Amino acid sequence: MFQYSKIDCLGKEGILVHHTNGNSFRCIPEHGAVLIDVQLNGQAILDAYQNQEELETNFYYKSALLAPFPNRLQDGKFTFEGKTYQFPINDTNTQNALHGFIYDKPFEIEEIHCLADEACISLVYHYNGHLSYYPFSFRMRVEYTIKSNHVFEVALEITNLETFPIPIGMGWHPYFKLSTSIVNDLKLQLPPLHQLEIDDRMLPTGELQLYSAFDMPKEIGLTKLDTGFKYEKEKGRIELFLQDQNYRLKYWQEAVPFDYIQLFIPDGRASIAIEPMSCAADAFNSNTQITTLAKGTSRLGKCGVLLTPN
């Protein structure tokens, strides 16, 4: 039977959902509903914030929810319906805006269900359009579900609260690890993907190239990744696999609306980010990629992982 409790989590009030079989997760509602830990089969699979300083500085945006856009926005600017908006520059290396602004905002607990074979918690953030650089109100809802068969799922739903269409995108920024201490030793397998070519500011050039380096399971080794990809198909699931000597992790995301994915290995190479995105980097500035959401409508995206022993 799953149970939940309120706990201290890096100096803030957190939620723990756990089962006697070793499946559990922890999150902090008041700080972006961020996940601090996910364990399946008793094995931690997330490289998350380790202390209060990392949490407060949003270090590497670990497990952050991303909206109203994921990834980068060139110069922090975009134009919509003839008006230009300027986001703060929070990626000083490239002088771009990065990952929107909800990653540390307070979410409210909407409901919690704990059953014998699964548990879920839904949390919601209402944005009222008060920021001058994004004056469009929306609601972001996240649902975390954990199952007794060692599955963890994330559902993101974003809703336009305006009476007109708005530009909006969303994503999630988890870093995954297994029992090994470095990703070099992990085997990675990817589905057919097109790599987004980028310039020296990490922005897409518009060119796509078929990526086949990990068509078959292969050790990551010294491969460097901070790379965006587009799924070849318009429907179905994107599935990829990570494996070490003890475990195999299957990650999946629905290709609608998550037809983009970013892979990133940070300094230290202790984990790999696998980031579902509803649009590519700088989508607000691309006529072919800008994503608008009609008034009063929602967009729902799902992803998840399954951990099995070898």
Image (tube, grey):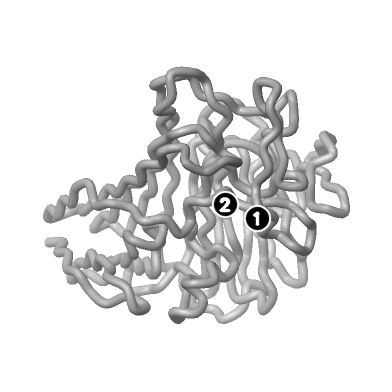
Q: Is residue 287 in view?
A: yes
- Pick whichever, 157 or 225, lies toward us: 157
Which amino acid, mark 2? Glu
Identity of the residue drawn at 73% across and 24% down = 288
Identity of the residue drawn at 38% across and 73% down = 43
Q: Is residue 157 in view?
A: no
- Pick whichever, 93 or 238, lies toward us: 93
Give the x, y percent position of residue 291: 60, 28
Q: CA distance from mark 1 to mark 2?
A: 6 Å
**Residue furthest right as drawn:** 200
Disc 2 residue crowd, few under 14, some 14–19, many 20+, Cα 10 Å: many
Residue 278 placement: quadrant: top right
Disc 1 residue crowd, few under 14, some 14–19, many 20+, Cα 10 Å: some
Give the x, y percent position of residue 153: 37, 50
Q: Secondary structure at mark 1?
A: strand
Residue under pointer 2: 275
- Is 282 placed left or right of 165 in the picture? right
Mark 1 and mark 2 in contact? Answer it, CB < 8 Å: yes
- Is 173 placed left or right of 122 in the picture? right
Q: Secondary structure at mark 2?
A: strand
Task: In the rendered view, tell whether residue 108 sits above or below residue 24.
Answer: above
Residue 185 placement: quadrant: bottom right
Residue under pointer 1: 263
Give the x, y percent position of residue 232: 67, 32
Which amino acid, mark 1? Leu
Q: The N terminus is located in which quarter?
A: bottom left
Identity of the residue drawn at 68% across and 27% down = 83
Identity of the residue drawn at 19% across and 69% down = 6
Q: The C terminus is located in which quarter?
A: bottom left
